Amino acid sequence: MNFFRSIVQNTKLDFSKDAAYDHLKGSRYNWPKLLLQFSCMVTGYITSLTDDDREEVLIIDESTHDRSRSKGVELLARVYDYCTKRYLKGFRLLTLGWSDGASLVPLDFALLSSADEEKLYLDLVKSVQIRDFDGLIAYTTIAMMRYTSLSYEQRLHDDPRTFGEIFYACCDEIKDLSLLEALQRILTLTIHNLRKTSVLSEQIVQEMLDALMGAVKELFILKPSLMQVTA
């Protein structure tokens, strides 16, 4: 759900955009608890599709959320981005996720601002302009629940055991994501982001892609056993 298109620009709703923003900014709602309960429901269903000895992991990720163009956002601070090797206005974003090797479900998220040492919550996308901190907490929860829903839908598409008891008995559990598949996803996302920046020409991007694919191909030729390694 894109909040701006679905709420702000939607003239067919029975309530105004101000009412929606006021709801998001309400301090009485425990949005992180809602996310955790929703995610636990999804992970509970996913674990029912696999054997008891299936390995499950918790993943902690730290990244930088760039809000350089924002003004008036609470606790906006100057932080160092280790990917671009420069300082920017934004937040250090911490994310806690659960995975069984095939699906990833976010459980919680927090941000660290150099202006305040306590943990704080932030939205992950820029489809809505919310500067009130309670509103950021609410919208981040909605963004994370949307991602969880997409992960659930992908599992239904990929895992034949979701079809029912007969398929559960006859089909093997879904395999972990292979190293090759993981590399393919990373490369696809990297190239997509490079093209969006408009800093590099299409020719340079294509040359970088060819070089990376050549190196990956050579690696798997030298060590074919890596084809079966899980990420």
Image: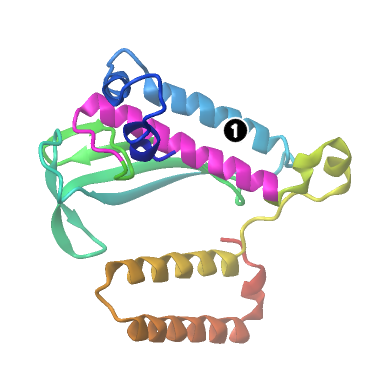
Residue 194 visible somewhere in the drawing: yes
Q: Position of residue 175 (x, y in %)?
A: 70, 55
105 to 84, vertically: above or below: above
Q: Is residue 120 left or right of residue 208?
A: left
User: In the rendered structure, which amino acid carries the disc numbered 1?
Assistant: Val
Q: How far across and how far down the image is residue 160, in percent?
A: 77, 48
- Quadrant where the N terminus lies? top left
Instruction: Please indicate, yes or no, whether residue 55 appears anywhere in the rendered image.
Output: no
The stretch in magenta equals 128-157
Left or right: 101, with 67 as reference point? right
Q: Which residue is mark 1?
A: 42
Q: Residue furthest front?
A: 12
Q: Quadrant of residue 75?
A: top left
In the figure, residue 12 lies in which quadrant?
top left
Image quadrant where one finds the C terminus: bottom right
In-image side of 193 versus 25 (left or right): right
Q: Element under label 1?
A: helix
Q: Main secondary structure of the magenta part?
A: helix
Q: Does the segment drawn in magenta span residue 33?
A: no
Q: Residue at x 33, y 38 (%)?
A: 4
Identify which residue is drawn at 72% across, 51% down.
Answer: 174
Residue 97: % across, % down: 47, 41
